[in-house]
Each structure stands twice: as C-alpha cells, then as structure tokens.
C-alpha cells in the first residue's frame, strides 16, 4: 500500500487501505516530519515559540532556495520582457495610504466572550460550510455560502454576525455562541523610524511586495529600456498581523512572496489575464504537481484595485487552499501614486504615439505555501515486508531531484580507512557542482533511511571493491534500486537528473 498525496485518488481515499491516515492526521504527520528532519522549526522554540512565526532548518532552507530559484528562472530567464528588482521592506508611509492599505487592509474579527478567543468571522463561517458539505447538508451549505458571498461583497459586518447566529456557529473552545460584534482589524505592522516618536516618523512593515514594484515602474522601464508589455519580478518578505494565524506555515505573520507585475496596454488586460492564468498553472504542473490536485477559484469579492481575480488552489490534506493569485489590477496603483506624488507615471508608447498609464496583471505566489505544497506532494508512505515477513512502513520524500535539499549522499560502507579517504575524495570533487553530503556513522541501512526521509535522490556507497574497480554502488531513492557505476561518471549521472532545464522546458 502506498499513501501518497500526489496520486490521482479520490478525496475519500477509497483506493487506500483502511489503515491510511485521515486528512488531518496526515497533515499532522507532515508537520511533525518537517520539524524532526530539519525543514521547519517554531521560531524561538526554546522560549516556547512565537505564534505564527517559523524558522527554516538546514534542509528547509535548501528546499526553499531551490523553489525560489525555479520561480526566478521561469520569470526572468524564460521571458525576454521581464526583469527583476529587490525593493526595500521599509517604504515611505504615504505609499500605503495611496495603495489603500491604511484605510482598507482589514479582516473581519470576532471574539467569543466566554473563551476570550479571537477568530476571523469569515473563516469560522467557511468551517461551518465545510461541515455542512461533509455531512451532506447540501441546502444548508448552499444557503450559507450564498449568504457569506453576499456579506463579503457588501462589507456587511452585521450580516456576517447574523450568519454566525442563525447557523449556531459555536466557539470550538467554549462551545458557546456568545459572540461580540464583528469589527474590522487592520493587518499592517507599524513602527517608528529615526529618533522621533511622533506620527510623522511612523512607517510600516510592508504587507505585500507589489508596491515596491509600482513605485519603481519608471526607474526600471527607463534603465532596463523596456517596452510595454513588460514585467517586473521580485521576491521578498512581507508582514501581516493576522487575526488568526494557524495551520502551520499556511498562514504566518512573516512570510515570503514571489510576485510579478506585468504592465500592458489599457484594453488588453483581459487577454493577458487569461495568458498568465494558463502560464502559472503550467508552472505548477511542470514542478510535478498533479492536475487533479490543482484548481482555479474565481474571486466573488474583488479587491478594490481589481477587475478580475482568481486563485490557484492546491488540495492539501486539510482541503483546497490558495497557493497563488492572478489579479488584473487595472491602472489603480500607478494612478494612485500619480495622485499622491503629483508625478506622472506614464508610458510613452512609440507604436501608438501616445502616453498612458499601463494596466497591470499580477501573479503573486506565497513561497511558504509553495514549500508546504511541495512537502505534502512529496510525502510518501509505502507498506511492505521486513526481513522476518512482518509489515513494515517505508517513508520517503518523493521530491524532484532538482528540488531536493541534498542531491547526493556519499557513504563509506564502514568507518574505516581507506574507504573514508576515497569517500572524502569523491565529496571534495563533487561539492563544487551540487549539494553533497558525507556520512560514515551508523549502519548503511539507517543512513539510507535518513536520506530517504529528507528526499535525497541518490546515495553512493564506497566499499572495498571500489578501491579496485573505481566504482561505487549508486542507490535510487524511489525504487531503492542499486547498481554499480564508475566514480568518474557520478557527476554526469547526477547532474542530468537534477537539471532544472527539463522543468523549465515544460512551462
């Protein structure tokens, strides 16, 4: 039996054995796996942690860097009309007034008076909708979904509270329906800059990376000599004081975005919106995410700057969740910055011989959510028999070799010279080409298992025969197949498998 999140199986898991874990159980196994094997730690763990803030361990940072690299190459190398920037986290505070974040960047918040716990009003309603769906109450599910959509579209906080009361949504802690009114909660973190502490010195930790692109529109267009249509890409940290941050790294207060703003002629935004929807879906498929686990979700309530928006959602063990957004932002941002600065942010189109404010198509993906998607997609359990004929579960991460934190592990069969010397010689020879790991502790089987658990695609074992024939035993992670290969061929074998070009060609 194989429990694997990227298999094309129905959500109810009918083609898994009865011992297969439920969605929430599987998610918890993946969360535990991430900590135990050096992918993600709770921030300030020795101080009992800081809620919704996480650190990436030695394997996590490698995987994260590999995902970021693939996105960057797909955006800037494969597209001759997209360039990158790296804007500062701190920006002039009026930027956020112009963008609408100071006045409108809010979530609907509600407290339970008995438990003193705080919740996102829309999220606890969504949980009730899922509850109705699982229990087969189709009419109640449809009614509540329509009510939620209508309330969010009108920003009707009283209607949200009415839905919570009408459907008797209880606090999961107190089990009561004793709620406060719903109120808006601004998500931006503020701080002071310089030595003064008055209002004029207040700055914000950016809640998105997009505004750094917009304020640099003319700088980049002129210095990079770009012609519309063209794009500007950026990766970087963003910060949001989430009302309720939960579900591991799904929703954090400090996170990383990978965004691209694509500037187009007014009137062409609809076709470019569809183009980038398809392009971004193809990117996810090229990374090995099954089509059955991905879907588009069209926004019912559009942001104040958008005329069209959709999310790419992935089916995590806990259900479909947003991973990436594609938005048609119109010309809102550039016009707002024009109005607040009284400086023209226009493009002189030589083909039309006219000046205009470009429209913008945005692709915005959360790197942390992509990281979690990748872990969930790779986590694999297979059942077989041990040496005594008993049941045995094998767990490994089926990561694409290009994404794996370590590409090749090198093991002397036993901790003894001259096997150690030859093993280190191979390590020193290959470490300039890709990430290599050397280990000589414990039995060879345990060393294989440790590498399986972090997704290492290849292990090379140096034995006494290697001293004679200059070959090693190369083990393949997924199949556990082993074969003898020349030491001189190791570089080419591994590099062929870890090449990102095969991924990029599929996009």
Image: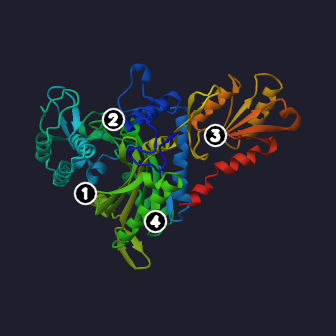
Q: Earlier in the sequence, mark 1 or mark 2?
A: 2
Name the outermost residue toward the front. 389
**Residue 344, placed above or below residue 292:** below
Q: Secondary structure at mark 1?
A: loop
- Closest to the camera, between mark 4 and mark 3, is 3
Q: Between residues 134 and 265, which one lies in front from this camera angle?
A: 134
- Closest to the camera, between mark 4 and mark 1, is 1
Image coords of residue 57 (percent x, y): 52, 31
The residue to which callout 1 is attached is 300
Q: Earlier in the sequence, mark 4 or mark 3?
A: 4
Q: CA distance from mark 2 to mark 3?
A: 33 Å
Image coords of residue 26 (percent x, y): 43, 35
Image coords of residue 83 (percent x, y): 50, 59
Q: CA distance from mark 4 to mark 1?
A: 28 Å
The residue to which callout 2 is attached is 246
- Closest to the camera, between mark 2 and mark 3, is 3
- Closest to the camera, between mark 1 and mark 3, is 3
The residue to which callout 4 is attached is 230
**Residue 289, placed above or below residue 409:** below
**Residue 100, placed above or below residue 250:** below
Q: Earlier in the sequence, mark 1 or mark 3?
A: 1
The quarter of the picture where residue 189 lies is: top left
The residue to which callout 3 is attached is 477
Q: Between residues 338 and 178, which one lies in front from this camera angle?
A: 178
Q: CA distance from mark 1 to mark 2?
A: 24 Å
**Residue 424, placed above or below residue 272:** above
Image coords of residue 303 (percent x, y): 26, 55
Name the outermost residue toward the right. 468
Q: Secondary structure at mark 2?
A: loop
């Amino acid at each position: 039996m194989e429990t694997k999140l990227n298999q094309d199986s129905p959500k109810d898991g009918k083609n898994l054995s009865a011992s297969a874990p439920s969605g929430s159980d599987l998610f918890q196994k993946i969360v535990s796996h991430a900590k135990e094997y050096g992918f993600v730690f709770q921030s300030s763990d020795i101080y009992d942690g800081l809620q919704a803030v996480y650190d990436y361990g030695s394997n996590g940072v490698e995987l994260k860097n590999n995902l970021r690299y693939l996105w960057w190459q797909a955006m800037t190398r494969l597209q001759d009309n997209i360039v990158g920037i790296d804007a500062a986290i701190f920006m002039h505070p009026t930027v956020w007034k112009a963008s609408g974040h100071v006045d409108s960047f809010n979530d609907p918040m509600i407290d339970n008076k008995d438990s003193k716990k705080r919740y996102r009003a829309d999220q606890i309603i969504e949980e009730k909708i899922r509850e109705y769906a699982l229990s087969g109450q189709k009419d109640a599910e449809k009614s509540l979904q329509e009510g939620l959509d209508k309330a969010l579209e009108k920003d009707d906080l009283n209607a949200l509270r009415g839905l919570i009361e009408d459907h008797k949504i209880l606090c999961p802690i107190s089990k009561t329906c004793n709620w406060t009114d719903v109120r808006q909660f601004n998500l931006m973190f503020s701080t002071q800059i310089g030595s003064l502490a008055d209002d004029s010195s207040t700055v914000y930790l950016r809640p998105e990376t997009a505004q750094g692109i917009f304020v640099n529109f003319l700088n980049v267009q002129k210095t990079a000599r770009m012609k519309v249509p063209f794009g500007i890409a950026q990766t970087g940290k963003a910060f949001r004081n989430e009302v309720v941050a939960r579900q591991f790294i799904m929703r954090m207060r400090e996170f990383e975005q990978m965004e691209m703003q694509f500037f187009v002629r007014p009137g062409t935004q609809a076709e470019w919106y569809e183009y980038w929807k398809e392009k971004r879906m193809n990117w996810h498929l090229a990374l090995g995410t099954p089509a059955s686990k991905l879907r588009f979700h069209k926004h019912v309530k559009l942001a104040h700057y958008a005329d069209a928006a959709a999310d790419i959602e992935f089916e995590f063990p806990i259900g479909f969740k947003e991973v990436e957004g594609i938005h048609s932002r119109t010309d809102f941002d550039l016009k707002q910055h024009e109005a607040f600065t009284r400086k023209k942010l226009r493009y002189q189109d030589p083909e039309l011989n006219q000046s205009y404010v470009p429209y913008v198509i945005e692709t915005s993906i959360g790197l942390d959510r992509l990281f979690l998607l990748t872990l969930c997609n790779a986590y694999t359990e297979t059942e077989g028999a041990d040496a005594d004929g008993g049941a045995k579960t094998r767990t490994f991460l089926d990561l694409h070799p290009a994404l794996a934190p370590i590409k090749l592990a090198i093991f002397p069969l036993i901790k003894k010279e001259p096997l150690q010397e030859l093993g280190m010689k191979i390590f020193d020879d290959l470490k300039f080409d890709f990430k290599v790991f050397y280990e000589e502790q414990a039995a060879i089987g345990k060393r294989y298992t440790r590498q399986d658990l972090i997704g290492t695609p290849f292990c090379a074992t140096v034995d006494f025969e290697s001293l004679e024939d200059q070959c090693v035993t190369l083990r393949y992670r997924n199949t556990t197949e082993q074969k003898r290969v020349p030491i001189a061929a190791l570089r080419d074998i591994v590099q062929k498998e870890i090449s990102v070009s095969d991924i990029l060609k599929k996009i």
